[in-house]
Image: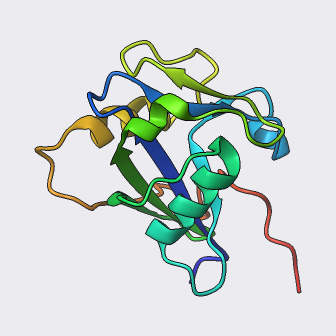
Amino acid sequence: MPHFVYVLALLFTPDGRHVVLMRKTRPAWQAGRVNALGGKLLAGESALDAARREVREEAGVDVAAWEEFLVWEDPVYRMHAVRAFDEAARHAHTAEDQEVFLADPAALPPALIDNLRWLVPLALDRDVAVPVRVASRDPEGSGLTEPVTAG
Protein backbone atom coordinates (compact mmCIF):
# COMPACT_ATOMS: atom_id res chain seq x y z
CA MET A 1 0.00 0.00 0.00
CA PRO A 2 1.54 3.35 -1.02
CA HIS A 3 2.10 5.99 1.66
CA PHE A 4 0.82 8.80 -0.57
CA VAL A 5 -1.89 9.04 -3.22
CA TYR A 6 -1.77 11.95 -5.64
CA VAL A 7 -3.72 13.36 -8.55
CA LEU A 8 -2.03 15.07 -11.51
CA ALA A 9 -4.59 17.18 -13.37
CA LEU A 10 -3.94 18.14 -17.00
CA LEU A 11 -6.46 20.78 -18.02
CA PHE A 12 -6.48 21.55 -21.74
CA THR A 13 -8.37 24.07 -23.82
CA PRO A 14 -11.14 22.32 -25.83
CA ASP A 15 -8.94 22.25 -28.96
CA GLY A 16 -5.95 20.80 -27.02
CA ARG A 17 -3.68 23.67 -28.11
CA HIS A 18 -2.97 24.83 -24.56
CA VAL A 19 -2.50 23.13 -21.19
CA VAL A 20 -2.63 24.73 -17.75
CA LEU A 21 0.68 24.40 -15.90
CA MET A 22 2.16 25.75 -12.66
CA ARG A 23 5.59 27.13 -11.80
CA LYS A 24 6.36 25.39 -8.50
CA THR A 25 7.86 26.90 -5.36
CA ARG A 26 7.25 23.76 -3.26
CA PRO A 27 7.92 21.01 -2.37
CA ALA A 28 11.69 21.59 -2.37
CA TRP A 29 12.47 19.01 -5.08
CA GLN A 30 10.05 20.78 -7.47
CA ALA A 31 11.00 24.40 -6.65
CA GLY A 32 11.77 26.30 -9.84
CA ARG A 33 10.27 23.56 -12.03
CA VAL A 34 7.02 23.49 -13.97
CA ASN A 35 4.39 20.86 -13.19
CA ALA A 36 0.71 20.21 -13.76
CA LEU A 37 -1.91 21.09 -11.20
CA GLY A 38 -2.77 18.57 -8.52
CA GLY A 39 -1.82 17.26 -5.12
CA LYS A 40 -2.64 14.70 -2.45
CA LEU A 41 -6.04 13.08 -2.27
CA LEU A 42 -7.96 13.70 0.93
CA ALA A 43 -9.32 10.77 2.94
CA GLY A 44 -12.24 9.20 1.07
CA GLU A 45 -11.77 11.44 -1.99
CA SER A 46 -11.71 10.02 -5.52
CA ALA A 47 -9.03 11.09 -7.99
CA LEU A 48 -11.65 12.89 -10.10
CA ASP A 49 -13.01 14.79 -7.07
CA ALA A 50 -9.45 15.65 -6.00
CA ALA A 51 -8.70 17.03 -9.48
CA ARG A 52 -11.76 19.24 -9.34
CA ARG A 53 -10.81 20.51 -5.86
CA GLU A 54 -7.11 21.06 -6.64
CA VAL A 55 -7.80 22.91 -9.91
CA ARG A 56 -10.37 25.11 -8.17
CA GLU A 57 -7.87 25.91 -5.37
CA GLU A 58 -4.78 26.38 -7.56
CA ALA A 59 -6.20 27.88 -10.77
CA GLY A 60 -9.51 29.41 -9.68
CA VAL A 61 -11.69 27.50 -12.16
CA ASP A 62 -14.24 24.73 -11.64
CA VAL A 63 -14.07 21.76 -14.00
CA ALA A 64 -16.42 18.85 -13.35
CA ALA A 65 -15.65 16.52 -16.30
CA TRP A 66 -12.36 14.71 -15.66
CA GLU A 67 -11.16 11.41 -17.13
CA GLU A 68 -8.43 9.24 -15.63
CA PHE A 69 -5.88 8.38 -18.33
CA LEU A 70 -3.01 6.90 -16.30
CA VAL A 71 -2.29 5.27 -12.95
CA TRP A 72 1.36 5.27 -11.84
CA GLU A 73 2.26 2.72 -9.16
CA ASP A 74 5.33 3.19 -6.99
CA PRO A 75 6.26 1.55 -3.67
CA VAL A 76 5.89 4.96 -1.98
CA TYR A 77 3.02 6.57 -3.90
CA ARG A 78 0.25 6.11 -6.45
CA MET A 79 -0.44 8.89 -8.93
CA HIS A 80 -3.73 9.17 -10.77
CA ALA A 81 -3.25 11.31 -13.90
CA VAL A 82 -6.49 12.84 -15.17
CA ARG A 83 -7.37 15.03 -18.12
CA ALA A 84 -10.08 17.48 -19.07
CA PHE A 85 -10.73 19.53 -22.20
CA ASP A 86 -12.69 22.57 -21.08
CA GLU A 87 -13.12 26.26 -21.89
CA ALA A 88 -12.29 26.96 -18.22
CA ALA A 89 -8.61 26.41 -19.12
CA ARG A 90 -8.60 29.81 -20.83
CA HIS A 91 -9.69 31.41 -17.53
CA ALA A 92 -7.21 29.61 -15.28
CA HIS A 93 -5.15 32.02 -13.21
CA THR A 94 -2.83 32.11 -10.24
CA ALA A 95 -5.12 31.57 -7.25
CA GLU A 96 -2.50 30.74 -4.60
CA ASP A 97 1.21 31.53 -4.31
CA GLN A 98 2.44 29.51 -7.32
CA GLU A 99 2.18 30.93 -10.86
CA VAL A 100 -0.42 29.30 -13.11
CA PHE A 101 -0.14 29.79 -16.88
CA LEU A 102 -1.15 28.35 -20.26
CA ALA A 103 1.51 26.50 -22.25
CA ASP A 104 1.66 25.10 -25.76
CA PRO A 105 1.88 21.28 -25.54
CA ALA A 106 4.11 21.29 -28.64
CA ALA A 107 6.61 23.69 -26.98
CA LEU A 108 6.65 22.79 -23.29
CA PRO A 109 8.84 24.90 -20.96
CA PRO A 110 12.46 23.77 -20.42
CA ALA A 111 12.08 23.55 -16.61
CA LEU A 112 9.26 21.01 -16.95
CA ILE A 113 9.08 18.02 -14.57
CA ASP A 114 10.54 15.28 -16.77
CA ASN A 115 7.57 12.90 -16.84
CA LEU A 116 5.30 15.60 -18.27
CA ARG A 117 7.25 15.41 -21.54
CA TRP A 118 5.45 12.10 -22.23
CA LEU A 119 2.36 12.52 -20.01
CA VAL A 120 1.11 15.60 -21.87
CA PRO A 121 1.22 13.92 -25.33
CA LEU A 122 -0.33 10.76 -23.86
CA ALA A 123 -3.17 12.83 -22.38
CA LEU A 124 -3.80 14.37 -25.80
CA ASP A 125 -3.96 10.97 -27.55
CA ARG A 126 -7.60 9.94 -27.49
CA ASP A 127 -6.89 6.68 -29.37
CA VAL A 128 -5.12 5.11 -26.37
CA ALA A 129 -7.23 2.82 -24.19
CA VAL A 130 -7.29 4.38 -20.72
CA PRO A 131 -6.35 4.25 -18.00
CA VAL A 132 -2.82 3.22 -18.87
CA ARG A 133 -1.08 1.50 -15.93
CA VAL A 134 2.64 2.00 -15.36
CA ALA A 135 5.01 1.21 -12.50
CA SER A 136 8.24 2.71 -11.23
CA ARG A 137 11.23 0.78 -12.51
CA ASP A 138 13.22 0.93 -9.27
CA PRO A 139 11.88 -1.47 -6.60
CA GLU A 140 12.79 1.18 -3.98
CA GLY A 141 10.61 3.74 -5.77
CA SER A 142 11.28 6.62 -8.12
CA GLY A 143 12.06 9.21 -5.46
CA LEU A 144 9.53 11.59 -7.00
CA THR A 145 7.83 12.49 -3.74
CA GLU A 146 8.59 13.70 -0.25
CA PRO A 147 10.40 11.24 2.01
CA VAL A 148 8.31 8.90 4.14
CA THR A 149 8.64 9.81 7.82
CA ALA A 150 8.78 7.08 10.42
CA GLY A 151 5.82 6.72 12.72
**Residue at position x 58%, y 51% from top?**
55
Quadrant into which the C terminus falls: bottom right
- Look at the picture and state if 37 lies above or below 39: above
- Look at the picture and state if 120 lies above or below 135: above
Q: From the top left corner, tell me how far across and down residue 102 is, in percent.
A: 53, 23
**Residue at position x 29%, y 34% from top?**
14
Q: Residue 53: which quarter of the image?
A: bottom right
Color theme of the render: rainbow
Q: From the top left corner, tell me how far across and down residue 73 is, in percent.
A: 46, 66
Q: Is residue 87 left or right of residue 44?
A: left
Q: Is residue 113 visible?
A: no
Q: Is residue 114 left or right of residue 132?
A: right
Quadrant into which the N terminus falls: bottom right
Q: From the top left corner, tell me how far across and down residue 59 is, in percent.
A: 64, 42
Q: From the top left corner, tell me how far across and down residue 54 is, in percent.
A: 62, 57
Q: Is residue 90 visible?
A: yes
Q: How many marks?
A: 0
- Look at the picture and state if 5 lies above or below 30: below
Q: Residue 28: which quarter of the image?
A: top right
Q: Is residue 128 left or right of residue 15?
A: left
Judge by depth and name the residue closer to the eye, 145 or 9.
Answer: 9
Q: Residue 125: which quarter of the image?
A: top left
**Residue at position x 14%, y 56% from top?**
129
**Residue at position x 74%, y 38% from top?**
30
Judge by depth and name the residue closer to the eye, 37 or 62.
Answer: 62
Residue sitting at the far left: 127
